[in-house]
Image (tube, helix red, strand yellow):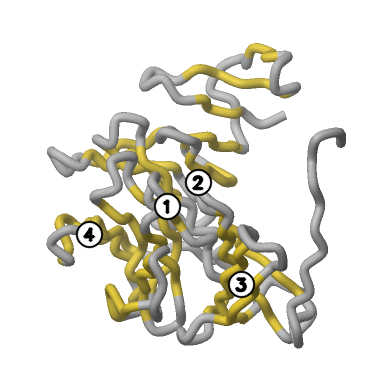
């Protein structure tokens, strides 16, 4: 396209890349790279940092453990720090440079950052139950947690998380039903949990907070939004809910 510049980047010994996360400011991109072809549901790789602010692209593999099917890293809105998942825990990377630092040790799935950049949401995975954790990035400690039993009888696919636009709630798919994955709203202040959709296929955050989710069942007839080209319904919290189609 006119006005755009394209650059080819070579990453040595990498056959596939996934979970790509560009910085909201600057010209830095984080992504996972694997020496194996991305075939099937399981892929393991390492985190790379790509800088595009020089005459030549600079790609560096960061010193951190491997990651199996990780979510994309999440950034602070000012691009000062990023957080990413590994098989040994969650790490923090400063845009100022240096090696990543271990922030939280354990087995985790999914990741989201609050609109104000103060909280990190993720699942702590344990046998027989999963715990939704709110991690205080300033105090570097868990601020709140919800333990959810694991009753799902099929293979798990996706650990989607997203904060509400006002930062007062966290939305997540859960595996506490035998054959469905409800989307639930976890109130950060009160701790109350409410079902938003009885069977959610996927959900994701949007710029400034909010949730876009796809469900298997209609709650009501959707309206057509021609700007996006598919049915959307406006939720009561001001975020878009995408219905199945």
Q: Is any part of residue 136 visible from this angle?
A: yes
82 above or below 42? above
Q: Which residue is mark 2?
A: 24
Q: Are marks 3 and 2 in contact (CB under 8 Å)?
A: no
Compare marks 3 and 1 and give the one earlier in the sequence: 3
Q: Position of residue 213 (x, y in %)?
A: 54, 37
Q: Are marks 4 and 2 in contact (CB under 8 Å)?
A: no
> Which label sits in the foreground, 3 or 1?
1
169 above or below 224? below
- Considering the image in quadrants, where does the C terminus appear? top right
Compare marks 4 and 2 and give the one earlier in the sequence: 2
- Mark 3 secondary-structure assignment: strand
Q: Which residue is mark 3?
A: 32
Q: Which residue is mark 4?
A: 137
Q: Residues within 10 Å of mark 3 (few under 14, many from 20)?
A: many
- Indicate the quadrant where residue 209 lies: top left
Q: Residues within 10 Å of mark 4 (few under 14, many from 20)?
A: some
Q: Which residue is mark 1?
A: 79
239 above or below 38? above
> Which label sits in the foreground, 4 or 2?
2
Compare marks 2 and 1 and give the one earlier in the sequence: 2
Q: Are marks 1 and 4 in contact (CB under 8 Å)?
A: no
- Mark 2 secondary-structure assignment: loop
Horizontally, is 231 left or right of 100 in the view?
right
Q: Residues within 10 Å of mark 2 (few under 14, many from 20)?
A: some
> Which label sits in the foreground, 3 or 2?
2
- Considering the image in quadrants, where does the N terminus appear? top right
Horizontally, is 20 left or right of 166 in the view?
right
User: How far apart are labels 3 and 2 at the CA level?
Assistant: 18 Å
């Amino acid at each position: 396209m006119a006005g755009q510049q394209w650059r080819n980047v070579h990453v040595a010994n990498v056959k596939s890349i996934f979970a790509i996360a560009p910085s909201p400011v600057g010209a830095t991109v984080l992504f996972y790279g694997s020496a194996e072809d991305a075939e099937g549901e399981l892929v393991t790789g390492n985190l790379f940092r790509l800088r595009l602010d020089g005459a030549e692209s600079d790609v560096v593999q960061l010193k951190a453990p491997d990651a199996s099917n990780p979510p994309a890293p999440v950034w602070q809105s000012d691009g000062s720090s990023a957080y990413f998942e590994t098989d040994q825990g969650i790490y923090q990377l400063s845009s100022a440079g240096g090696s990543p630092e271990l922030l939280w040790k354990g087995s985790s799935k999914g990741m989201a950052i609050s609109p104000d950049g103060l909280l990190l949401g993720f699942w702590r995975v344990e046998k027989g139950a999963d715990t939704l954790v709110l991690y205080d990035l300033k105090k570097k400690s868990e601020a709140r947690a919800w333990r959810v039993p694991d009753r799902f009888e099929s293979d798990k696919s996706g650990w989607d998380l997203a904060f509400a636009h006002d930062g007062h709630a966290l939305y997540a798919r859960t595996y506490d039903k035998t054959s469905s994955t409800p989307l639930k709203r976890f109130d950060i202040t009160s701790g109350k949990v409410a079902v938003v959709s009885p069977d959610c296929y996927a959900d994701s955050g949007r710029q400034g907070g909010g949730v876009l989710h796809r469900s298997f069942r209609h709650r009501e007839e959707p309206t057509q939004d021609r700007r996006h080209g598919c049915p959307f319904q406006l939720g009561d919290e001001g975020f878009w809910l995408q219905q199945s189609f």
